[in-house]
Amino acid sequence: PGTGWPEPGGFLPREALKLLGLVTAPGICGLEVVEVSPPYDTSDITALFGVRVVVEALGSMVAHGNLGKHKSIIDKPVSF
């Protein structure tokens, strides 16, 4: 793995994605992708998985209606 601190016995990618799906279903307020280290990630596998985590989280949030449901001030009608 392309990380500075690999964790023996950690989650497999499919387990991490399953867990992510369970967490994003009720809604999340933030997400961080940490410990992706390009010098250790010679084949870009960890970086690509990090991107997939972000895309899966955003997709799940959209699918559950937790993203984009708040109107911004720009969407409000202007009265003079």
Image (cartoon, grey):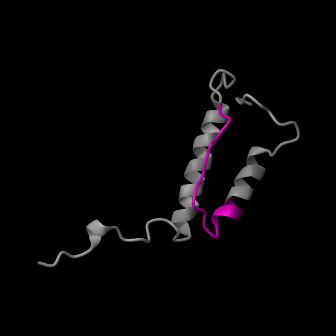
Q: Quadrant of residue 25?
A: bottom right
Left/right placement of residue 70 relative to residue 56 reads left
Q: Is residue 7 above or below residue 39?
A: below
Q: Please give the name of the residue rendered at 62% of the width and 25% of the height, measured from the top-left corner.
A: 38
Question: Residue lying farthest front?
Answer: 80
Q: Is residue 19 above or below residue 73?
A: above
Task: Locate residue 8, reporting x and y percent.
Answer: 87, 36
Task: Locate residue 5, reporting x and y percent.
Answer: 77, 31
Q: Please give the name of the residue rendered at 79% of the width and 33% of the height, measured from the top-left corner.
A: 6
Question: Residue lying farthest left?
Answer: 80
Question: Residue lying farthest right?
Answer: 9
Residue 28 falls within the magenta-colored stretch: yes
Left/right placement of residue 65 relative to residue 49 reads left
User: Quarter of the image containing the N terminus?
Assistant: top right
Q: Please give the name of the residue rendered at 18% of the width and 75% of the height, measured from the top-left corner.
A: 78
Q: Which residues are drawn in magenta?
A: 21-36
Tell me the chief SS of the magenta region.
Answer: loop
